[in-house]
Amino acid sequence: SLVAAKELLIKAQDSGYAVGAFNVENMEMVQAVVAAAEEMRSPVILQTTPSTIQYASVEYFYANIRVAAEQTNVPVVIHLDHGNSFELAMQAYRAGYTSIMIDGSHDGFDDNVEISKAVVDACHPGKVSVEAELGKVGGKEDDLVGGEENLYTDPEKARIFAERTGIDYLAVAIGTAHGVYKGEPHLDLERLSEIRSLVTVPLVLHGTSGVLDDVVKECIRRGICKVNYATDLRIAFTKGVTKYLSEHPDAIDPKKYGAAGRKAVKQYVKDKMCVCGCAGQA
Ligand code: 13P
Ligand code: ZN
Ligand code: NA
């Protein structure tokens, strides 16, 4: 069933696990993520970026995810990932998204506070929860290769930011980047603990594809309650499809190779639900 995210993340925070948040790009990936959640008895967050929404629309993704959510009894959240304008946040809100990220991390502190607070004020009356970002996670959300620029979150500023905006959860920049890493990512775990000691709302880890599972687990021990995976799902889907097509060069039915992609994504998501500790929590 479709639910709001706030309670899920507070429960995760109280119990010391994280809820996996998985980016979906098509119907098969929606089915794969929800099937994984059902099999693992896990709460789950499905999310779409602005470029994904541009590919289909918020209405398309909402419809897909709502149907999948209605066919299972594990809690499913539909979340806007890296919302880049107030208007897009409102589009997702009107479409029925139950959680919304407004990413003002590219603006200055005051502008980030302003836009984040505006989205909070618009969403909270409808019981839709809001994620915002302070600092800057490296790389670009929809690019394969993670960029270098990473502006670490300042713990004291994070405290003030959370207080002024009234956001429900906060994305932190501690050394992760979107996309695949060129080398090994070096995470500032001390900084994460410091943020956690000053900020009461659940914390979100971005750029998790390519981060070692043990490092993710340590981040969860230090206060991460939502873990975002995108690039690796895209890779899993594409590898599944590619493998099928290379083994069946005459294949022409999208259902056949679509199912192969779907299966690969489901397995990946199941693995990550164990890493996050959300398996068995629904
Ligand atoms: P990755 O693509 O590195 O998994 O990052 C996911 C993310 O942060 C989505 O917002
Ligand atoms: Zn992200
Ligand atoms: Na990454």
Image (tube, grey):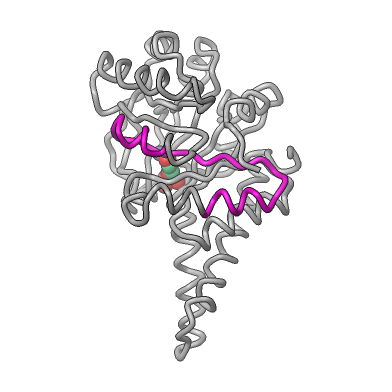
Q: Is residue 259 visible?
A: yes
User: How far across and down, in percent of the image, does residue 136 sit?
Assistant: 32, 29
Residue at left offset 46%, top offset 19%: 167
Q: Is residue 176 above or below residue 25?
A: above
Residue at left offset 49%, top offset 56%: 233
Q: Nearer the viewer, residue 179 or 37?
A: 37
User: How far across and down, in percent of the image, does residue 6 sit?
Assistant: 58, 26
Residue at left offset 55%, top offset 37%: 215
Q: Is residue 249 above or below residue 92?
A: below
Q: Is residue 184 visible?
A: no
Q: Nearer the viewer, residue 90 or 18?
A: 90
Q: Nearer the viewer, residue 86 or 105?
A: 86
Q: How many marks?
A: 0
Image quarter in which the C terminus is found: top right
Residue at left offset 38%, top offset 48%: 179
Image quarter in which the N terminus is found: top right
Ligand 2 placement by image quarter: top left
> Is residue 10 part of the magenta span, yes or no?
no
Q: Is residue 217 above or below residue 180?
A: above
The quadrant holding residue 86 is top left
The quadrant holding residue 174 is top left
> Is residue 82 part of the magenta span, yes or no?
yes
Left or right of 111 on screen, residue 165: right
Q: Nearer the viewer, residue 268 or 261?
A: 261
**The residue stretch that appears in magenta:** 64-92
Left or right of 275 on screen, residue 156: left
User: How far across and down, in percent of the image, does residue 239 sit?
Assistant: 47, 68
